[in-house]
Amino acid sequence: MKAAVLHEYGPPSNLKYEDFPDPKPGEGEVLVRVSAASINPIDLKMRSGAAKDHFPVDFPTPIGRDVAGVVREVGEGVTNFIAGDRVMSYANRTYAELCVVKASDLAKVPEGLEITTAGAIPLVSCTGDQIVRVAAKVEAGQTVFITGALGSVGRCAVFAAKEIGAKVIAGVRKKQLDEAKSLPGVIDAIAIDDDTALATLGLVDAVADTVGGETATKLLAKVKQGGNFGSVLGEPKGTALHPTIKVTAIMAKPDPATFIHYGEAIRDGKLTLPIERMMPLSEAAEAHAISEKGGLTGKLVLLV
């Protein structure tokens, strides 16, 4: 098969489009013919080596986490998928024509959802949903401040909070305020790149943070006593100064039910997950370079 293979940590150019041995499904696994694999921040960190302490790479190997495609073959013991099923998941080594996924981590793509769109959903849906429900422990009637609300994870987090019945305040850049206020479920938006504006934020029940850094540290002071601070970027600095706040940092876990739920919401127009650009897998190195420059307003999807 062809794959975008990483031989050593480094810049985007280290991703090489080349032949690589076909994977084989083992017990409880499914072989997927990949159609689409979107690029996520963790992919950039795995390629550069920034994430090697938590996600070491066994060279040489394809990288990539999101996948949507068609079942090619099932391993021993798999009874809920058959060849030809359209599927999606949050897996490993997905920048390739073929990848192996645990059947327990796999979901069928909802009818009517484009498979290229499905390839952008798994990681961000689980991350956005779990930062709200598991990390920030948001409950109905509460007020939650969600940073990066216009990012892919942020949009999913806003959707989750709205479903719970919480009131959402979006934390975005100053130039994004109007767009953020138009998101369903958002009652207000505040510029997190403006200290004066951020100072106007009153105490909230919870923060769901997708930005990290100094912004996260500042927001610790905005959580009421006994409130929750959820993060997908590790524990922020200054946590010890706020002993009454429950800080929970998570790494999203694959959840097929979440893939399906968010896929249906996107298909039905209840949730918007912008895709800015689609590129062939052969241009994975260029796609990583574009992603690293930043400024994207939607996901970048590799087509296989």
Image (cartoon, grey):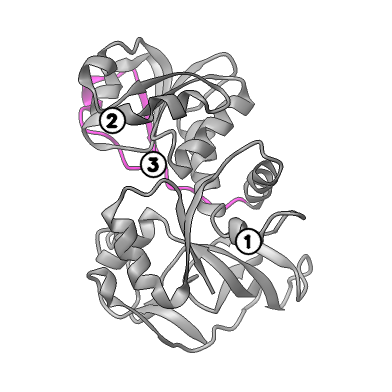
Q: Which amino acid type is shown beneath numbered disc 2?
A: Ala
Quarter of the rendering containing residue 145: top left
Q: Which residue is mark 2?
A: 216
**Real-space Cα distance between discs 3 and 2?**
11 Å
Quarter of the rendering containing residue 304: bottom right
Number of marks drawn: 3
Q: Which residues are magenta?
A: 231-255
Quarter of the rendering containing residue 200: top left
Q: In the rendered structure, does residue 252 fall within the stretch colored magenta?
A: yes
Residue 174 visible in the snapshot: yes
Please give the name of the residue rendered at 57% of the width and 60% of the height, measured from the top-left corner.
Answer: 119
Please give the name of the residue rendered at 31% of the width and 41% of the height, measured from the top-left corner.
Answer: 234
Q: Which residue is mark 1?
A: 88
**Real-space Cα distance between discs 3 and 1?**
22 Å
User: In the shown orientation, is residue 271 left or right of residue 277?
Assistant: right
Circle 2 packing at 10 Å, graded few (<14), some (14-19), many (20+), is many
* Magenta: main secondary structure: loop
Q: Which residue is mark 3?
A: 232
First reached walking from the N terminus: tag 2 or tag 1: 1
Secondary structure state at the residue bearing disc 3: loop
* Residue 128: percent from left, percent from top: 50, 40
